[in-house]
């Protein structure tokens, strides 16, 4: 027995009384914590080892080395056993260290077991709950174990941290020097010279309601009602993503515009038959053969990607926001066309109801259900299975919505991921 718990508690209560009150409500005994020994020792919580079991201090200095030495303000996500905090506080240039708790019960356990006073009492330290903030802060280090152990309240920030860490890896497919990309862009050039500029659509539907339709499993419950709405005289404007086009046609729903950006999209997803009355908004990486067979009007768009830098100079066209998924330019198009409100369908970013997509079999569009090893919170506050790239797409949509407060956004299902910044439309989602 030591006086560590009392000393830690006194510092917390004195410096951060409201946070201390919240931590007092936690149940650290619910965690499966085990001592793990090697050349040194550490804790394993729910099967996840918090730090090195051989040399925690050396590991902390290695972690600290990834952050710029002269940074005056650094953010640490996760509390660990306090080793990284001490390593950073030893830097003369550091003026402020903000530590973001990712698992409140875990931190409550650590302060009961180990002396955390050396960093808790440092006046440069600010201690916060990660989930109290809407965005991550830079520069940061996210403790790996706690990105796994993050609790539900802090999961949204956890997702943003992982997305940021994976950003360079995710962008590897979009290298302008890639021979395949260069070939696609060269093949597309003749069409870019004759097709319409997407900017011609901007402002053309001011004040109108837009339905933006993605391919999440929850779309299936809305097919019948969407068909009825589509037949109405005073109806919203229908924009769908490329993979939703075929399922919509199969249920007698013809969109006004289809948006496609992915070089892997083919006529399997966008069959040309019956497309005469449907506009196609595309980025130039699409297959030329697909574009040439499309019967409706074609509208060219670029994204901010360096892939299109040369084309933007040769053939200026309007741009749409792309954050990794086709849902982003579809939503951006609706906003730039003048949407008075945007209602999302099938924007699940998860696999509710044991399915990956509406209208497609398991694995037909890439991910298989059995490969979904991650989770997000759904509209009921429950965990629902997903994959990492879907979480990144969700984050970028939430950021886009936050940046356009003049447009109200509505969601139509509680089964998929909760989308910050949207409201549930009572007409579609009681």
Image: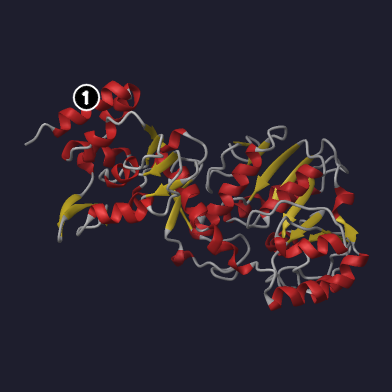
Image: 254 above or below 361: above
Query: Residue 13, can we see it?
Result: yes
Q: Secondary structure at mark 1?
A: helix
Image: 319 above or below 97: below
Query: Residue 254, can we see it?
Result: no
Give whichever of 113, 98 is nearer the camera: 98
Q: Residue at x 56, y 62 (%)?
A: 170
**What residue is shown with label 1?**
10
Question: Whole-percent x and y of residue 330?
Answer: 73, 52
Question: Whole-percent x and y of residue 138?
Answer: 50, 43
* Relative side of 190 to 59, left or right: right
Instruction: Using the rendered view, name the quadrant where residue 113 is placed.
Output: top left
Q: Residue at x 19, y 59 (%)?
A: 54
Give whichever of 101, 59 is nearer the camera: 59
Scheme by which the image is coloured: secondary structure
* Relative side of 164 to 407, left or right: left
Question: Whole-percent x and y of residue 280?
Answer: 82, 60
Question: Whole-percent x and y of residue 38?
Answer: 15, 61
């Amino acid at each position: 027995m030591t006086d560590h718990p009392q000393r830690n508690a006194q510092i917390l209560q004195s410096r951060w009384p409201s946070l201390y009150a919240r931590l007092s409500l936690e149940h650290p005994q619910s965690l499966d914590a085990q001592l793990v020994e090697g050349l040194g020792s550490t804790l394993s919580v729910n099967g996840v080892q918090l730090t090195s079991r051989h040399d925690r201090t050396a590991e902390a200095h290695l972690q600290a080395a990834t952050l710029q030495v002269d940074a005056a303000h650094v953010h640490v996500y996760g509390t660990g056993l306090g080793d990284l905090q001490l390593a950073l506080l030893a830097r003369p240039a550091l003026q402020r260290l903000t530590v973001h708790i990712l698992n409140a019960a875990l931190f409550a356990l650590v302060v009961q077991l180990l002396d955390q006073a050396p960093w808790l009492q440092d006046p440069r330290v600010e201690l916060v709950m990660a989930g109290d903030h809407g965005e991550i802060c830079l520069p940061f280090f996210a403790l790996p174990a706690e990105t796994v152990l993050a609790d539900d309240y802090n999961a949204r920030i956890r997702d943003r941290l992982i997305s940021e860490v994976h950003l360079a890896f995710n962008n590897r497919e979009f290298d302008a020097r890639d021979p395949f990309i260069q070939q696609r862009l060269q093949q597309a050039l003749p069409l870019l010279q004759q097709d319409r500029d997407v900017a011609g659509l901007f402002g053309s539907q001011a004040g109108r309601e837009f339905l933006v339709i993605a391919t999440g499993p929850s779309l299936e419950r809305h097919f019948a009602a969407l068909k009825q709405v589509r037949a109405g005289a005073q109806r919203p404007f229908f924009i769908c993503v490329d993979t939703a086009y075929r399922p919509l046609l199969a249920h007698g729903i013809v969109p006004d515009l289809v948006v496609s950006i992915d070089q892997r999209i083919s006529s399997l997803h966008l069959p040309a038959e019956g497309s005469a009355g449907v506009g196609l908004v595309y980025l130039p990486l699409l297959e030329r053969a697909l574009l040439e067979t499309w019967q409706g009007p074609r509208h060219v768009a670029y994204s901010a990607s360096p892939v299109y830098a040369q084309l933007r100079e040769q053939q200026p066209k309007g741009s749409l926001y792309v954050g990794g998924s086709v849902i982003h330019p579809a939503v951006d198009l609706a906003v730039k066309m003048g949407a008075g409100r945007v209602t999302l369908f099938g924007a699940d970013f998860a696999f509710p109801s044991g399915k990956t997509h509406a209208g497609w079999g398991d694995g037909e569009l890439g991910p298989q259900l059995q490969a979904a090893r991650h989770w997000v919170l759904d509209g009921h506050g429950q965990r629902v299975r997903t994959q990492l790239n879907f979480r990144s797409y969700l984050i970028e949509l939430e950021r886009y919505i936050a940046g356009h407060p003049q447009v109200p956004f509505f969601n139509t299902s509680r089964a998929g991921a909760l989308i910050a910044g949207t409201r549930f439309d009572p007409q579609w989602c009681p």
